[in-house]
Amino acid sequence: MFIFYADVNGMKNGICKKFSATFSGQCYVSAHCEETCVKEGSPSGECEWKGVHWGYVCMCEYFC
């Protein structure tokens, strides 16, 4: 499996983040992102700026 460098952020306090598998479009309301991440099995999620190419994306948190 090939993982782009931006798919998973580095571990911080035992928590890793990755792009939501099902969220589509730009992420402007973290509550919508969090709802999506919880449905994906993540404890939480939030909108994060990932630069001009990606814009605001929904990042789900996971325990590493």
Image (spheres, rainbow, N blue to C red):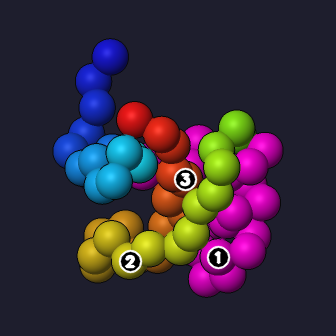
Of the two numbered discs 2 and 1 on the same chain, state the one appearing first in sequence.
Answer: 1
**Quarter-wise, where is residue 5 in the image?**
top left
Element type where label 3 sits in the image: strand
Relative horizontal placement of residue 32, taking residue 11 as reference (left or right):
right
Relative horizontal placement of residue 17, taking residue 35 as reference (left or right):
left
Of the two numbered discs 3 and 2 on the same chain, state the one appearing first in sequence.
Answer: 2
Q: Which residue is mark 1?
A: 30
Q: Answer yes or no: do the residues labelled 3 and 2 have beta carbons within 8 Å?
A: no
Which residue is pictured at 70% across the width and 40% down the height?
40
Q: Which mark is residue 60?
A: 3
Q: Which mark is residue 49?
A: 2
Relative to residue 22, is residue 54 depicted above or below?
below
Q: Answer yes or no: do the residues labelled 2 and 1 have beta carbons within 8 Å?
A: no
Q: In this orientation, which residue lies closer to the viewer: 15 or 38?
A: 15
Which amino acid type is shown beneath numbered disc 2? Trp
Q: Is residue 32 visible?
A: yes
Q: Which mark is residue 5?
A: none
Q: How many marks?
A: 3
Residue extent of the magenta highlight: 17-39
Check residue 29 for magenta coloring: yes
Residue 19 x %, y %: 47, 50
Residue 62 x %, y %: 51, 43
Of the two numbered discs 3 and 1 on the same chain, state the one appearing first in sequence.
Answer: 1
* Structural distance between the alpha carbons of marks 2 and 1: 12 Å
**Quarter-wise, where is residue 64 in the image?**
top left
